[in-house]
């Protein structure tokens, strides 16, 4: 496939050839028309010159015609002498269109051409537009005029004067112009095409540089590099800036993917090792012994743990691909929060925590009740995991003008300020000192899933925390304030309780 440089040069050459051809045709036609107009003016001028000669002779009181006994009426010798000074082809006709005088140029023509010329001159209208006449070896343009305003009787036999000019110059000059164009045009086109090819090469040189740099970066190991951005402010600068932004996003995505793969592998490595050890222990233990049952129970726990991890990963993967549908219907959040609060109270008692619902206002949103319950439960479970015994967890649901707010406040270990920007990333743990196998160990996916659920419902999730003082997670959701939605939500809640 031809390069853009070659295609651009070819298009430029074709456009230039077409433009030059049209310009040449226009110049040829224009010059031909201008020459024709010039010849028409010249024919009229010659006729006027002959008329002026006739008029001057008549004005001097000299007769312009005489009666020859042999051939009839002819111009006088005095008028003939003066008419011979008029160039080109001149004829003087009487009222019967009989020729009274032929110039030397006319007399040099063949007899047939003289007859043809006389016939056209007879048809020519007085003071009319010039008309062409084709002779055997040339073409003439004839113009006519009639004497007027002279004393009567001096040239009463002269009716009109016809003058003709050779039209060969009409074709000669345009042909010369056309020949000149055929000689100069190829040279101009060749020089222009070479110049366009060189210029396009200089224009596309920065593009080649960008291509080479992008090829060097696209190997996946050099995403930290960026394209040079000049200060021209043109399309190439915009292209470089756009590519730099794309490379930055790719670098972030690749880094996140590598971290995700490493963390997922680490999460699966530990339970798989434990599962393998438990299965081996169960195989070697005596049948139906306590040791075998303990090993099988531990293997079952690790299997459940891996199943939960795989389910969470599958949820996030489907969410990333946009293949996880949210079933939107009116949902009464106060009923869901009451249910989540009851479960939290039971879980809190086992952990030695005090869980209470401080605020529970009626609120309705359009969304997926199952996913919203998962979101609220994840936040509550997160608070229970990282709150020491004797601590307190407060749950609130309030309805405001800008929407619905759900919050979970705990008195747990808190989150360092340096960790806050990363807590919604997958597999991130603010409490990295704890073992994944510890009592409060998790996968680090709960908050990532919670953020996705909030965003899928058109809301957001935020956190404020101080290390050693506790944390507050707040979910903002848009409210469905219409009464039919509230009635539908109450109906769904009542059906769920039944």
Image: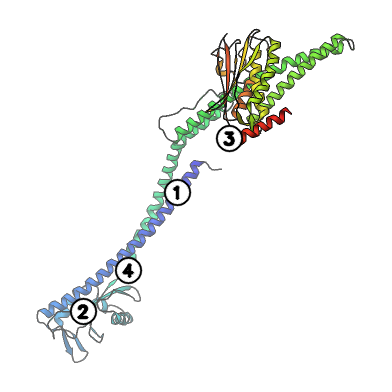
Q: In the shown orientation, is residue 279 left or right of residue 491?
A: right
Are dots 4 and 2 in contact, CB under 8 Å? no
The quadrant the C terminus occupies is top right
Q: In the shown orientation, is residue 495 left or right of residue 106?
A: right
- Residue tagged by mark 3? 482
Q: Residue 146, which numbered label? A: 2
**Residue 411: image location, x then y, percent:** 60, 11
The quadrant the N terminus occupies is top right
Q: As rendered, which of 280 and 341 lies closer to the eye? A: 341
Are dots 2 and 1 in contact, CB under 8 Å? no
Mark 1 or mark 4: name the one nearer the start of the chain: 1
Mark 3 or mark 2: name the one nearer the start of the chain: 2
- Residue tagged by mark 4? 168
Are dots 3 and 2 in contact, CB under 8 Å? no
Secondary structure beneath disc 3?
loop
192 in relation to 218, above or below: below
Q: Residue 459, which numbered label? A: none
Q: Residue at x 68, y 10 (%)?
A: 435
4 vs 2, front mark: 2
Mark 3 or mark 4: name the one nearer the start of the chain: 4
Secondary structure beneath disc 2?
loop
Mark 1 or mark 3: name the one nearer the start of the chain: 1
317 in relation to 168, above or below: above
Secondary structure beneath disc 4?
helix
Q: Residue 13, which numbered label? A: 1
Q: Which residue lies most toward the right here? A: 287
Mark 4 or mark 2: name the one nearer the start of the chain: 2
**Mark 1: few, some, or many residues within 10 Å (few <14, many ≥20)?**
some
272 in relation to 3, above or below: above
Q: As rendered, which of 203 and 425 lies closer to the eye? A: 425
**Mark 3: few, some, or many residues within 10 Å (few <14, many ≥20)?**
few
Distance between mark 4 and mark 2 Cα atoms: 27 Å
């Amino acid at each position: 496939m031809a390069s853009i440089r070659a295609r651009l040069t070819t298009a430029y050459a074709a456009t230039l050839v077409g433009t030059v051809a049209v310009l040449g045709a226009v110049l040829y036609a224009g010059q031909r028309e201008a020459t024709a107009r010039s010849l028409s003016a010249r024919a009229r001028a010659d006729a006027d010159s002959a008329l002026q000669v006739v008029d001057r002779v008549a004005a001097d009181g000299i007769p312009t015609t005489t009666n020859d006994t042999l051939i009839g009426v002819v111009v006088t010798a005095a008028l003939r002498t003066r008419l011979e000074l008029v160039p080109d082809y001149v004829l003087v006709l009487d009222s019967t269109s009989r020729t009274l005088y032929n110039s030397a140029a006319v007399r040099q023509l063949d007899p047939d051409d003289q007859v043809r010329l006389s016939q056209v001159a007879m048809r020519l209208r007085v003071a009319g537009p010039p008309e062409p006449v084709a002779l055997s070896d040339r073409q003439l343009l004839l113009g006519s005029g009639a004497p007027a305003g002279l004393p009567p009787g001096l040239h009463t036999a002269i009716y009109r004067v016809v003058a003709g000019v050779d039209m060969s110059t009409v074709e000669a000059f345009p042909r010369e112009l056309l020949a000149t164009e055929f000689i100069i045009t190829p040279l101009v086109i060749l020089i222009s095409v070479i110049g366009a090819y060189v210029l396009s090469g200089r224009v596309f040189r920065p593009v080649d540089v960008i291509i080479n740099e992008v090829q060097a970066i696209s190997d996946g190991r050099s995403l930290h590099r960026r394209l040079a951005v000049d200060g021209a402010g043109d399309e190439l600068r915009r292209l470089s800036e756009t590519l730099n932004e794309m490379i930055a996003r790719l670098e972030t995505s690749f880094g996140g993917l590598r971290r995700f793969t490493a963390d997922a592998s680490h999460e699966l490595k530990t339970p798989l090792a434990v599962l393998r050890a438990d299965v081996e222990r169960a195989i070697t233990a005596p049948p139906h012994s306590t040791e075998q049952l303990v090993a099988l129970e531990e293997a079952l726990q690790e299997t459940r743990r891996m199943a939960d991890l795989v389910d969470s990963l599958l949820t996030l993967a489907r969410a990333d691909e946009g293949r996880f549908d949210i079933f939107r219907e009116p949902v009464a959040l106060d009923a869901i929060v009451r249910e989540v609060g009851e479960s939290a109270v039971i879980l809190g008692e086992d952990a030695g925590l005090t869980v209470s619902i401080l605020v529970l206002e009626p609120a309705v949103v359009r969304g997926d009740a199952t996913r919203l319950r998962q979101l609220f439960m994840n936040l509550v479970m997160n608070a229970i995991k990282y709150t020491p015994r004797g601590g307190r967890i407060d749950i609130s649901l309030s309805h405001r003008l800008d929407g619905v707010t759900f919050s979970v406040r705990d008195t747990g270990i808190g989150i360092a300020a340096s960790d806050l920007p990363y807590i919604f990333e997958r597999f991130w743990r603010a409490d990295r000192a704890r073992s994944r196998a510890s009592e409060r160990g998790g996968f680090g996916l709960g908050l990532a899933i919670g953020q996705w659920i909030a965003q899928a419902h058109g809301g957001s999730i935020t956190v404020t925390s101080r290390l050693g003082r506790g944390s507050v997670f707040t979910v903002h959701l848009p409210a469905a304030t219409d009464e039919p939605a509230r009635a539908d939500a109450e109906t769904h809640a009542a059906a769920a309780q039944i």
